[in-house]
Image (tube, coloured by chain):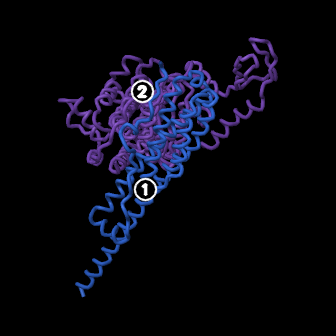
Chain colours: A purple, B blue
């Protein structure tokens, strides 16, 4: 799959240059609109500078930005042993050089993504809701999909696009807002020379048009390149787990959820395994999303028969797309050539059921939000928020006075801090 | 003079190709060894976990002496196995003993609700998966290595330096490949 990695690297460069050019274009017109006929020099140099800084920042700390934007918290194995186990299983299966860092987003909407620069510095992120909704095999499918993004070198590209897309959306937003606050004043003061004023007005109109279009264009570009890699990550995931039904039913559960992930936005949406921003019914069929329609992905996974090869996935894909896109190859040639038969695992792996999962989910989110749990001798579990300032609390059920473990609260608070320090 | 230069050039070219092939053979062999080491780590971990599981279960399952004995026996056999083939056989036996154990667990609902037992069971499940995935990876690496040894022109270098094909780690029959199924819904 070496050529795939090469392709991804090339695409990253194309995106890097393409985004740069569109930023320059935007800078040109905004400069013209604000500072008159010579404004394009200033506008373009500012755009160029922004481009350089953005690229450097997204290369070196794009993952940290994306993680911070989505409010993900790095966790230790004690917080969710099964998640760590599953990530380690996939690490072994994919022969990753190091264990990816594991993060949980304290949100009840089920979703997941991966980020990082290369396999050595990768992170896997899941939401608390995902952990509650999926059983072990399904979780394994999702993690396999994310680990595939890591081994296929999608993560750099995806993180990079998320940051650049985010900044383009942000910049044009600033520009459009600034029009309300005196942006036009400069042009009106110069309108003494009529021709110049008119030209500036035209420039202004173009700038506004571009500012509105740029984010949409950027998003479309991003979508165009990222659809294929979702299929590919599905195919690679099956090669790792050899159990298509796990991923299929996980996708089904995620798509069936009508809860929107609060911390996701336009820029980061493309990272997730299923688009986190679309409402229920739409999510299954949406055509112009970053991701291929989930329903289609599920159908392909369910129609895989005979083996877990890339060729088997391609066959399932082609037979589903009969007539329309039969000849589209989603798997690079070297993947297809790898014809060694890979047996599928039969269903019926041992499953450990979760008990009272809704309560577990709430507890997990509280743990992530630095709550401390206190067990009263009467059996009641009391949840103590991290900012509680008193030393004692009386049990609401039996009235016993309990001491607050302040040292534990402190330790938990400093845990995240230490974490942020290591991430930076 | 010209012919001599061409000859020298050719010889240098051959030497470089030779070095390249030799190095890639060494690299592939190291990958095979490394992935075997990974299987070994996980097998050892499973052997360490089994006594934990047995300890937790013993309190609840007073009348299942034979089940525990067969697990202990299979475990010690697996621990003393040496070659790849021997290990595969011993581990299959251990798998069989474990699946019998989990069938018996079905009759003890209190045990199935025990938090410690669930934790150990999760660890054991994960370790079994890790073994399976490490094996999957090992067999992939062996395939690459063996292909390289048998294909021209690397086979010449391989025979010169006595690189030997590696053994696949296959479990004996298809039924044993499956992890024991335990249904908790009933």
Residue placed under numbered mark 2 in the picture: A250
Percent position of residue A39, x then y: 44, 39
In which quadrant is the C terminus of chain A drawn?
Answer: top right
Q: Mark 2 lies on which chain?
A: A
Percent position of residue A323, x then y: 17, 29
Most extreme residue toward the bottom is B1
Q: Residue A62 carries which label?
A: none
Q: Which of A142 and B127 is in front in this view?
A: B127
Q: Which mark is residue B32?
A: 1
Q: Quadrant of the rendered structure where residue B113 is?
A: top right
Marks 1/2 in contact by CB < 8 Å: the verdict is no
Q: Quadrant of the rendered structure where residue A269 is?
A: top left
Q: Is mark 2 on a helix, strand or loop?
A: helix
Badge 1: residue crowd in 10 Å (few <14, some 14–19, many ≥20): many
Q: In this view, does A48 lie to the left or right of A394?
A: left
Percent position of residue A117, x then y: 48, 46
Query: Compared with residue B86, is residue A318 higher up or lower down, i.e. above or below?
Result: above
Q: Residue at x 54, y 43 (%)?
A: B73
Q: In this view, does A300 lie to the left or right of A177?
A: left
Q: Residue at x 38, y 44 (%)?
A: B172
Q: Is residue B145 left or right of residue A359?
A: left
Q: Which residue is drawn at 49% across and 41% down?
A: B94
Q: Is mark 1 on a helix, strand or loop?
A: helix
Q: Is residue A239 left or right of residue A131?
A: left
Q: Which chain carries label 1?
A: B
Q: How far apart are marks 1 and 2 (CA)?
A: 33 Å
Percent position of residue A135, x then y: 47, 26
Q: Nearer the viewer, residue B74 or A199?
A: B74
Front: mark 1 or 2 = 1
Query: Compared with residue A145, is residue B1 higher up or lower down, i.e. above or below?
Result: below
Residue A195 seen in the current view: no
């Amino acid at each position: 799959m070496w050529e795939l990695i090469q392709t991804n690297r090339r695409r990253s460069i194309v995106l890097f240059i393409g985004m740069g050019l569109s930023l320059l274009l935007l800078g040109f017109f905004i400069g013209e609109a604000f500072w008159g006929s010579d404004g394009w020099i200033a506008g373009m140099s500012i755009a160029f500078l922004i481009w350089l800084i953005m690229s450097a920042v997204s290369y070196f700390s794009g993952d940290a930005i994306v993680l911070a934007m989505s409010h993900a918290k790095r966790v230790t194995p004690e917080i969710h042993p099964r998640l760590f186990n599953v990530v380690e299983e996939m690490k072994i299966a994919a022969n990753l050089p190091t264990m990816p860092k594991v993060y949980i987003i304290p949100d009840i909407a089920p979703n997941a993504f991966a980020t990082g620069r290369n396999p050595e510095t990768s992170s896997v992120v899941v939401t608390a809701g995902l952990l509650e909704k999926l059983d072990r095999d399904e979780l394994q499918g999702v993690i396999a999909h994310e680990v595939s993004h890591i081994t296929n070198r999608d993560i750099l590209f995806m993180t990079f696009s998320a940051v650049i897309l985010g900044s383009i959306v942000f910049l044009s937003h600033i520009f459009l807002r600034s029009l309300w606050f005196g942006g036009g004043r400069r042009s009106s003061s110069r309108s003494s020379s009529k021709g110049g004023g008119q030209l500036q007005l035209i420039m202004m109109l173009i700038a506004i048009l571009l500012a509105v279009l740029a984010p949409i264009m950027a998003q479309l570009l991003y979508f165009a390149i990222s659809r294929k890699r979702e299929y590919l990550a599905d195919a690679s995931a099956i090669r790792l787990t050899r159990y298509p039904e796990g991923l299929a039913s996980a996708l089904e559960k995620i798509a069936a959820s009508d809860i929107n992930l609060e911390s996701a936005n336009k820029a980061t949406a493309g990272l997730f395994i299923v688009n986190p921003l679309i409402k229920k019914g739409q999510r299954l069929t949406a055509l112009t999303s970053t991701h291929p329609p989930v329903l289609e992905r599920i159908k392909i996974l369910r129609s895989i028969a005979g083996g877990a090869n890339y060729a088997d996935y391609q066959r399932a894909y082609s037979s589903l797309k009969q007539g329309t896109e039969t000849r589209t190859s989603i798997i690079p040639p070297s993947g297809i050539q790898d014809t060694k038969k890979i047996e599928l695992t039969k269903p019926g792996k041992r499953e450990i059921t979760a008990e009272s999962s809704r309560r577990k989910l709430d507890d997990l989110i509280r743990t992530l939000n630095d709550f401390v749990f206190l067990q009263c001798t009467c059996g009641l579990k009391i949840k103590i928020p991290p900012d509680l300032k008193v030393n004692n609390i009386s049990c609401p059920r039996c009235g016993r006075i309990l001491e607050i473990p302040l040292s534990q609260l402190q330790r938990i608070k400093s845990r995240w801090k230490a974490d942020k320090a290591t991430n930076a | 003079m010209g012919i001599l230069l061409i000859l020298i050039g050719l010889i240098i070219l051959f030497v470089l190709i030779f070095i390249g092939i030799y190095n890639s053979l060494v690299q592939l062999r190291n990958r095979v060894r490394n992935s075997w080491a990974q299987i070994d780590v996980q097998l050892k971990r499973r052997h360490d976990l089994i006594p934990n599981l047995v300890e937790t279960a013993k309190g609840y399952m007073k009348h299942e002496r034979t089940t525990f004995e067969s697990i202990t026996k299979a475990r010690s056999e697996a621990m003393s196995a040496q070659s790849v083939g021997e290990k595969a056989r011993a581990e299959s036996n251990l798998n069989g003993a474990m699946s019998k154990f989990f069938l018996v667990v079905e009759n003890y609902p209190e045990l199935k609700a025990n938090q410690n037992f669930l934790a150990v069971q999760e660890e054991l499940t994960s370790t079994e998966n890790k073994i399976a995935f490490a094996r999957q990876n090992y067999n992939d690496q062996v395939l690459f290595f063996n292909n390289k040894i048998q294909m021209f022109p690397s086979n010449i270098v391989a025979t010169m330096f006595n690189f030997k094909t590696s053994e696949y780690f296959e479990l004996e029959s298809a039924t044993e490949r499956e992890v024991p199924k335990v249904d908790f819904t009933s």
